[in-house]
């Protein structure tokens, strides 16, 4: 611990989304003491409400955001190497719509997209004849030509928790369900009041404060710190719908809409298709964000203009919405607001520094975090260099980033695991799957069987390692089993969590000692 009183930390971070977790990881890896507080679960806001893509942002080229696209394309391959279990390649099919952008413009954009980021791992773009290519089967017959290119899929909420896990394993103190009530400067330190859920308020001190509160970034500045942040952030709502699977194959589709926006249709969780997103200005409570009827109509209309099978509201099995805290560049159109990030450092002479994070996209979170810690390096006297570009995330240390070979090895070593369960564990936990399974040599040795592929060993693992405290954390963020598990299994899991809470309240260990904090 450094100056600022007994128990002081170097950096206190408000916000446990992808940016806050990324900053905590980078800073802890440079030897700084870090405390991160998150008012809910990790990634429970914007970071788990994305379109689940690691991408350069093809459409950003139209807004001449070449630096952002180049950085994102470089980061795409960094993350593909760092976490091949939760990040994997995805081919996108872009049907040519003659009433939209001309073919030459699309080809030019894809040429730049192929070359701006020094692509090494992913195949380049090409033209596709939809009349003979399998990707044309679900599309309306007027679409004869398409372009195909590469980007990546990401399990966004898992990206957040794995980043936070790595931060904790490097010494960071990660506190979920802990609100920041207030923060005030006291000379060269911050005095911050925190309120853990169900506990007493505490005061902690820090040499630097990072405001990575996402949609609440202005609220933290205005109401918690007492600084004026009016006009610095523009909240944009993005909504998605999930429907039963609309097409065969592993490809995704990107459709041009008549408002010059684009809408994705992406294979999702095996049985479904994910459709999104919208761009709508939002001025409500970010915690209460939800899809509106006109957004549902917009998304259904957009994809129905391309698929043979119309998409109607009655098909929807799930929706989710998030609020993007974009830096307000005064664009009239919500979809044209920059997705670039802005780091604002407030460091008066002799006073503790404050760094606020505006904007950003999930693809560039690692680079944002690196630059954030670089900005704080001088005030905090940090000399350690950046390190995260070549460091795998927990479970991502798969040899040669070859997921298929890793999965084959898992199935060979644990032949008693059903194929679907082995694949789900490998995708979620990567090389940490062994920690979850322990010495088990049969399904019976995974503890209580809740049904629908849910076993007690997995729950014990996510509680011990992944900051899970309630069933929702597991069903909708650590996994998407909320889409697959039946009512009986969900009720059984809820009962297990209730018993866990009772055991903890009685002072007994809540989790088996065999699953402790990783060294």
Image (cartoon, grey):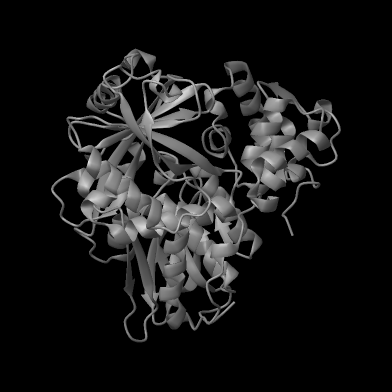
Could you say where residue 125 lies in the image, as x and y percent from the top left?
40, 42
- Taking the image as drawn, is residue 154 in sight? no
Is 479 or 131 nearer to us in this picture? 131
Is 379 or 51 nearer to us in this picture? 51
Could you say where residue 412 lies in the image, as x and y percent from the top left?
81, 35
- Taking the image as drawn, is residue 133 in sight? yes
Relative placement, left or right, of 162 versus 273 is right
Could you say where residue 310 lies in the image, as x and y percent from the top left?
31, 14
Which residue is painted at 70% across and 52% down in the image? 399
Quadrant housing residue 479:
top right
Q: How many marks?
A: 0
The quadrant of the image that shows the C terminus is bottom right
Relative placement, left or right, of 186 versus 389 is left
Q: Is residue 350 above or below residue 115?
A: below
Which residue is painted at 64% across and 33% down in the image? 424
Could you say where residue 233 lies in the image, as x and y percent from the top left?
25, 55
Quadrant housing residue 482:
top right
Q: Is residue 316 above or below residue 85?
A: above
Which residue is painted at 57% across and 43% down in the image? 86
Is 394 or 95 nearer to us in this picture? 95
Q: Is residue 506 above or below residue 196?
A: above
User: Quick one: which residue is furthest to the left in this view?
Assistant: 332
The quadrant of the image that shows the N terminus is bottom right
Quadrant housing residue 320:
top left
Relative placement, left or right, of 141 versus 449 is left
């Amino acid at each position: 611990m450094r100056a600022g009183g007994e128990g002081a930390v170097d950096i206190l971070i408000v916000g446990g989304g992808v940016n806050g977790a990324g900053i905590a990881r980078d800073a802890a890896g440079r030897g700084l003491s870090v405390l991160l507080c998150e008012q809910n679960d990790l990634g429970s806001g914007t970071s788990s409400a994305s379109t689940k893509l690691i991408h350069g942002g093809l459409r950003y080229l139209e807004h001449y955001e070449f630096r952002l696209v180049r950085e994102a394309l470089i980061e795409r391959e960094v993350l593909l190497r760092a976490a091949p279990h939760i990040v994997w390649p995805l081919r996108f099919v872009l049907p040519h719509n003659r009433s939209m952008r001309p073919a030459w413009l699309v080809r030019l954009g894809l040429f730049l997209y192929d070359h701006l980021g020094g692509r090494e791992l992913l195949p380049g773009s090409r033209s596709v004849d939809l009349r003979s290519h399998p990707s044309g089967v679900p599309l309306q017959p007027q679409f004869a030509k398409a372009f195909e290119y590469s980007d990546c899929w990401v399990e966004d909420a898992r990206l957040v928790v794995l980043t936070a896990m790595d931060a904790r394993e490097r010494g960071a103190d990660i506190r979920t369900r802990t609100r920041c009530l207030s923060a005030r400067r006291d000379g060269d330190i911050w005095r911050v009041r925190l309120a853990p859920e169900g506990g007493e308020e505490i005061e902690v001190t820090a040499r630097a404060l990072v405001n990575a509160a996402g949609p609440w970034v202005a609220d933290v500045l205005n109401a918690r710190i007492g600084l004026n942040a009016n006009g610095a952030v523009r909240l944009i709502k993005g909504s998605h719908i999930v429907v039963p699977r609309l097409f065969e194959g592993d490809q995704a589709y990107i459709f041009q809409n008549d408002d010059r926006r684009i809408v994705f249709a992406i294979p999702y969780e095996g049985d479904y298709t994910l459709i999104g997103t919208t761009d709508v200005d939002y001025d409500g409570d970010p915690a209460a964000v939800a899809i509106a009827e006109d957004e549902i109509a917009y998304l259904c209309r957009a994809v129905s203009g391309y698929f043979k099978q119309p998409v109607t509201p009655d098909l929807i099995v799930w929706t989710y919405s998030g609020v993007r805290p974009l830096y307000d560049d005064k664009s009239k159109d919500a979809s044209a607001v920059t997705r670039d990030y802005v780091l604002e450092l407030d460091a008066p002479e002799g006073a503790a520094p404050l760094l606020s994070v505006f904007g950003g996209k999930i693809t560039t979170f690692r680079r944002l975090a690196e630059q954030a810690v670089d900005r704080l390096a001088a005030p905090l006297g940090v000399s350690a260099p950046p390190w995260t570009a070549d460091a795998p995330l927990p479970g991502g240390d798969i040899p040669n980033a070859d997921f298929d070979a890793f999965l084959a090895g898992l199935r060979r070593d644990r032949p008693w695991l059903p194929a679907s369960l082995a694949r789900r564990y490998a995708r979620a936990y990567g090389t940490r799957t062994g920690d979850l399974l322990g010495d088990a040599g049969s399904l019976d040795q995974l503890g209580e069987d809740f049904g629908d592929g849910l076993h007690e060993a997995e729950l014990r693992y996510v509680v011990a390692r992944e900051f899970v405290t309630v069933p929702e954390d597991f069903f909708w963020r650590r996994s998407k089993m909320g889409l697959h598990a039946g009512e009986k299994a969900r009720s059984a899991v809820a009962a297990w969590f209730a018993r866990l809470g009772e055991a903890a309240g009685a002072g007994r260990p809540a989790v088996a000692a065999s699953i402790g904090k990783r060294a």
